[in-house]
Every structure is written in C-alpha cells, then in structure tokens.
Amino acid sequence: MNQAITGIGAVASIGRDVDELFENLCAGKTGHAPLRGFDRANFRARHAYEVDNRPAEGQDVPGRASALLLDAVAQAAKGAGLGEDLSGVPVLVGTGLRELRSLELWWRGEHQLTEKDLDFGPVLRERFGAVQAHTFSNACSASLYALAMGSDLLAQEDAPDAVIVAGVDVLTESMHGLLERVHPQAPDRVRPFDRNRTGVLMGDGAAAVVLRRDGFGEQVHGRLRGVAVNCDAYHATAPSPEGIAVAMREAHRMAQVTPADLDLVMLHGTGTLLNDEAEAVALAEVLGADRARPLMTAVKSMTGHTSGGSGLLNLVVGLRALAESRVPPTVGLDDPVDEAAGFRFVTGAPHNEEMTLMQLNAFGFGGINAVAIVEAGR
Amino acid sequence: MSQSSQIVISGVGVLVPGADTPTALAAGPAPGSEPVAPEQTVGKKGLRYKDRATQLAYAIAAKTLQDTGLLDADGLTVPAESVGVVASSNLGNLDTVTRALDTIHAETVSGTSPMDLPNASSNVIASSVAIRFGLRGPNLMVCNGATSGLDALHWAATMITAGRVDRVLVLGVEPDNDTVRRLFGDDRAVVDGGAAVVLERAEAAQQRSARARAVYRGYRQADDVRSCIERLRALDPGMEPARWQTPQTGSGPLPDDLLPGVPRDGFGPARASGALGVLQAVAATAWFADGGKGLVYAVAGADVAEPAAGVALLAPQGT
C-alpha cells in the first residue's frame, strides 16, 4: 500500500494550526490549565487541556467539537488544493464522544438540540457541501480506525480520488468525571509512562488529513503504508497487551516492514495506570531486540488526551517530525516504568535526527486497537 | 461480480416488540406489543451494568450468530479474529451520559458509578458485543444519523473486500428511554430493539456450509432519496427492483413518482433511526426466503430532500 497524504490540519489547546502546534510541542509548552467550561466544584480533577475559545470562563457553548473539526478539515483541504467544495470527497470522522457535550448542555436546558446535531454530517454538508460524511464513534482509537476505513475505501475498484480522514473530541462532563472517578487519587496532569503518573486528563483537539490514491504533482506530507485494526475482546476498560501486539504485528505485515525499519513511534501514552504498561509490554515484545532503536514520544503530555482525535493528531505531529527531523519531547516523563525500560524516549528537549518511517498507536475502550505505519513524504 | 469477490448475508436476527423472526418483521410488527426482554435470550448474567442498547445488542447478536452457525454450545465455530463487528446506533448511550451528568450536578463526581465509564463512550455497543462473544476482528461503531444502518453494511462490506476480515456481524439497535423521547419532543416511541445480519465473503460462507440469505449487491449515497435511487439503478442497468424498503422520513408519505409500481415496505410506526438499515436488510431476506426474486432496494435518509444511502440486495443464487 502506498497512499499519499497531501494535506494536513490540526487544532488543539496549544495550537490553532499545525505550525503553531508543532512549535509549541517542541518548546515543551503544555495546554494544562484549570477547567474552563465546567463548574469545577463538582470534580476532584480540576485541570484539563482545553482549547481556550469560550466566550467567558465557566460558560460553555454547544457545537465546539463541530467547530474544531471544521477548522482542521478546512486546513487539510486547503493544503491539498481541494478548497472548500468537498461535494465529491468522502469525509470520515473518528470521534469518541460525537457532539455529546452539546447533548449535555441541552439536557441542562441551555440550548436546543435535535437528533441531527449528534453526528458531524450536517455541519460538514453545510460548510463544505460534503455529501458523503461518516461519523465513527470508536473511543480513543477512532481517528486511526477512520484512517483504516479511508484507506480501504481508496483501495476499492470504484474508489474516489481522495478521502478526508479526520478526528475530533472535546471534553464532556460525563467522561471527564467518570475518568477521574476510577482513579484512587484525582489525576493532576498527564505524565505518560512515568512511574509517578496519576492518570489521564482530557484535552480538546481535532486533526485531519487528505488521503489520495496517488500524490503525483502535489505536496506529499507522507505515505500511508498500512493500518491494522482489531479488538482484544478482553475487557471494557483494561487493555490487553496480547491484542495490542497482534495489531502491531499486523500493521508491520501490511506495511512490509520490520521493527528494525522503524525510526519513530508516536505512542498512545495516555498516562493512565493500566494503558501505558500494556502499550509498553506489547511494544517491547513486538520490537524485541530493536526496542531501543526508534525514537519514542507521547504528546498527550502536552495536549492532554484528545480521545478519538488523538491518533490523527499523532499522525499530523509525526509527519511534521519526519519532515523537520525533529521530535517533540514527552514532558513530565522523568522516571519510566519498568515495562518501558530501554525505550529511546525523547525527554527534556526536542531531538534532532533524520527519520523515514514511523509507527502510530491508538487504543480505545473495549480493546479496540489501531496501529498505522507511515513513511516520510520525501 | 465474480464468485470470489461476492459478499452475502449468511445470518439474520431480529428482536423488536412484536417481531422476533425475520418473517414476523417482514409481515409488520404488531402495534402495541410488549417490550422485548433481552434476558429471555441471553440470561441475566452480565446485563446488570450495561445500558439498554447494549443489552438489546447482546440478545440480537446471540440470535444472529446462532442462526448462521458461528456460535454453538461450545462457543465460536470459527477463529475469533475472522469475525468483525460493525454496530449502528445514534441514540445508544445517551441515557448513560445524561444520568451521569445529573449525578455529577447533584452529588459531585463522587456519586457516579465507575461501572459507567465504558458506557459513557458511544462505542460501548460494538465493543461489548465483541467481548461477550469473543469476536476479535475489526470493531467499528457507526453513529451516522438516519443512514447509519446502511452505512454500517457498507463499511462491513468494505472491510471484507479489503481483505481485513472474512465476516462481520452488522448490528443496528436503538433504545427507547426518557432521554431519547425528550430529544424527539414527543411520545412517539423509538424501536427499542433492532436487528443484525452476518455479512460474509461468499467463499468463506460456503466453506463452513452456511446458507446465503441474500447477495449484497452494493451501496450508494447521494444528496437526496431520488438521486440515491438513480445511483442504485446504475449498479444494474435495466433491472427494475422488485421491492423497495422505504426510508422513514419526517415529512409524511413519499412522492408517488419515486419507483412507481415497485411494492413498498416500511418498517413500522416506531422510529428506527440507526437500526433502520439493518432492519430493512433483514426484512429483505425474509422476502427472499418466501420465494421473492430480483433486486430489493433498502433506502434510508432523514427526509426526501436530505442525504440518503441505499443498499441493493439480490436473492441468493440457486433459489
């Protein structure tokens, strides 16, 4: 497989576009801040990584997920020369929580809502004339799952020329609350793979890419070599290292690469107590003797967990890292867990090195795993 | 379409008030029927901390996997990674979200149940079904509005064509509860049930001697119902559909000039939302089982002038 990524877009707490996001990540800047849209008194965990775009502190507004999504899609479409008319381009959106924050505000009597406001089809049609819009709600692996579906669509006999794949999520009160509820002590910040991490906090974010069957004559940011997707079928919230390892091996098989070919791993790294260890165990096993070779980083340390959008946010950041030979550090990672011993984490400052091939990880509730292999666009 | 690339429906299951078989569904569920009881199909074990949509999905999945012989008393009859799940629901887990929100505002986060954590994520239906039945293939939750059930069939077929998986359990389910009734602003019931099919590579179905109930002919999407029908027609030029499974539109009856002369089947008075497309596919298989020949179109969309999706199904070969 060799599909070209010809446009990229992103928005997160620390950047309104890919340039700003990447520079801030490399500078070690985090979006960590006191909760902006909720009544903090209802929670023990009173920080998150939100996009600061509300009219006033504590005043939340509906449709924030849609707004971030439209921003990211517009950036990617513009970069790929598609412009604002996406009537012939399928748009596949991976999300953990759809517009459930709008549902929450409606339930509190703060605005109107209809069934059509729950998915992203209507806003994508209104803004871009997109006829083929699909909302996949696949928890935290959603946008890499969407990438797999986009890739499969392009491989069909009657495939379109291009597909836009996007991912988005913003905080919901229900998910923010339930995520902290399961931790013995409320998480204070996201410290992926650190022995002293306390859990996960959510972040707002969206990312989008334009994927083409071929990319001749255009700027090619990277080439998708393969995306594997599976399900552990093991537990609702606990990940299975075995299931994750299966997805990684399948991605390598699809991309026809070996662990020794990998230069960079963009980790899922949520900073939760179970997930980081499961990811590290699977990665150590799959990489084997090459476990110390690729650089590794986990940007949720600065963006928070952008849920369903995180896989594609990792892709966009990773493409820029390959292009600039520069990897942002994992802020807050001081003392790695034993399971990640020997990994070549980037910490402290960005690391400069020429790289060609990267692996992207995304894992979601219910053991739904997605692993992608992407090559630099040079 | 060559035999090797053909995709068939090899299993069906339905559970809605008034219809627990495809035949009963095709005949039209009796109005005013009792709510379905998932525990009568799958027992009470494991239902306690699951929302209504997931409980319904467990029962529908069990019926469907058993129907096609993928599940017997000893468990799965094929390798776990050869079975994927694609579920469609727009209204599933809205009740969990609103309940958790009320609890947080009334009692702070300390009053919430940790058991609700996975249920607050909309993929809970698809992943819970995979966990319960040990299905380790790709697992996708489609929440795509009125067309969602047919979209789910399309993505399952796309994954099979791409060689990711041999067979996919495609589920459509919607719960009826206070949250969804308030969302619709009236007392018209939501289906509170759903249906499933197993979509399978024809060769894979043959290898395990499963009976094809229908041939999946293709999926098309368009700006509106009329254009969608035209695009479905282009799949098999000159071949008129024998039946039409109609969309549930919000503005009353469909225009008469849409597929004139083709018998129309609707689902019923209850809103089916994301379950509709799968219910339509199951109803089509019942019509084929009763000797129906030719093409059946299933079309879904929020209204005649709104974006629509359609799937064309053919009677299985040899019938």
Image (cartoon, rainbow, N blue to C red):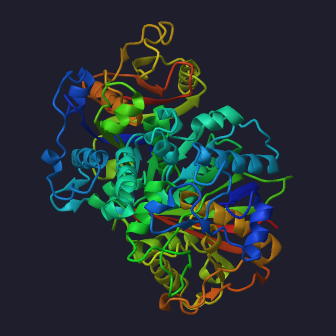
Q: Given the current orientation, which residue lies at the most extreme front position?
A: A41
Q: Is residue A51 found left or right of B122 in the rendered image?
A: right
Residue lying at 20% horizontally and 33% vertically, measured from the top left: B21
Residue lying at 44% horizontally and 49% vertically, measured from the top left: B141
The answer to whether A85 is drawn above or below residue B81 in the figure is: above
Residue lying at 43% horizontally and 65% vertically, measured from the top left: A179
Residue A186 percent across, percent down from the top left: 45, 73
Q: Nearer the viewer, residue B184 or B215?
A: B184
Q: Nearer the viewer, residue A322 or A28?
A: A28
Q: Is residue A279 found left or right of A81 in the rendered image?
A: left
Residue A151, can we see it?
Answer: no
Residue B299, can we see it?
Answer: yes
Residue A14 percent across, percent down from the top left: 71, 64
Residue B9 percent across, percent down from the top left: 35, 40
The answer to whether A245 is drawn above or below residue B155 in the figure is: below
Q: Nearer the viewer, residue B86 or A167?
A: A167
Q: Could you say which quadrant of the image residue A209 lies in?
A: bottom right
Number of on-image labels: 0
Residue B284 percent across, percent down from the top left: 34, 27
The answer to whether B106 is drawn above or below residue A247 in the figure is: above
Residue lying at 68% horizontally and 85% vertically, measured from the top left: A347
